[in-house]
Amino acid sequence: VFLQKITDAYRKDPDLENLLFDDFFRSKIQDALPAWRRIVAEGALSGVALPAMSSALSYFDGLRTLHSAANMIQAQRDYFGAHTYERTDRERGHFFHTNWTGEGGNTISGTYSV
C-alpha cells in the first residue's frame, strides 16, 4: 500500500522533486513531526545514538527553512580563509569580507593580500 503511494505521487507529478512535496507524504510527516522530535530529543538526552532519525530530521528542517544555518559556514570560511560571503539584505552577486580578528589583510576582487 505504501509503495503504491510513491507510485501515485510520481504519476500525479512526474517532475516531483521530492516525495515530501507531495500532499500525502507532507501530511504524514506533519502528523508525525511532534513525536519524531520527541524521539530524537529523548535519544540525545539518554545518550542513545539515532543517526538516521536525527539526520533525517535535520534534513527535513533544512528543506522547510528559508534561511538556514549555512550563513555560519560562510562566516567560518571567511574567517579562516577570507572566502567572502553574500548578505541577504543585499542583491545577489555582491560579496563581502569581514576582518573578524582586526588583523590580516584585505580582500580585493576576490583575492586576499596579507
Image: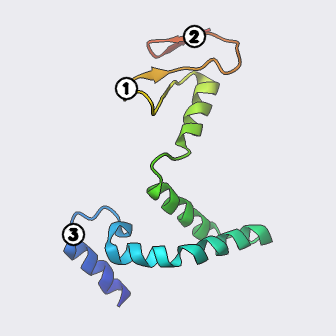
Residue at the spot 54% in from the left edge and 20% down from the top edge? 97
Disc assigned to residue 15: none
Q: Nearer the viewer, residue 39 or 49?
A: 39
The residue at the far bottom in this view is 1
Q: Which kind of residue does numbered mark 3 sit on?
A: Asp
Find disc 3 in the rendering and name its residue.
Answer: 13
Answer whether labels 3 and 2 touch (C-beta < 8 Å): no
Q: Mark 2 = which residue?
A: 106
Ranked by sequence position, the earlier of labels 3 and 2 is 3
The quadrant where residue 80 appears: top right
Residue 13: x and y, percent?
21, 69
Residue at 49% across, 55% down: 62
Position of the C terminus by quadrant: top right
Whether residue 97 sits left or right of residue 86 in the image: it is right
Left or right relative to 2: residue 47: right
The image shows residue 50 at horizontal and vertical percentages of 66, 70
Check the image and report above or below for 67 versus 107: below
**Residue 48 position (above or below residue 58):** below
Q: Is residue 48 above or below residue 68?
A: below
Q: What amino acid is at disc 2?
A: Asn
Residue 64, image x, y percentages:
45, 58
Circle 1 — which element?
loop
Say which quadrant the N terminus sits in: bottom left
Between the residue at mark 3 and the residue at mark 2, the CA separation in whole angstroms equals: 50 Å
In percent of the image, x 58 and y 74: which residue is there?
34
| Residue mark closest to the camera, 2 vs 1 | 1
Quadrant of res 104? top right
Residue bearing the label numbered 1: 93
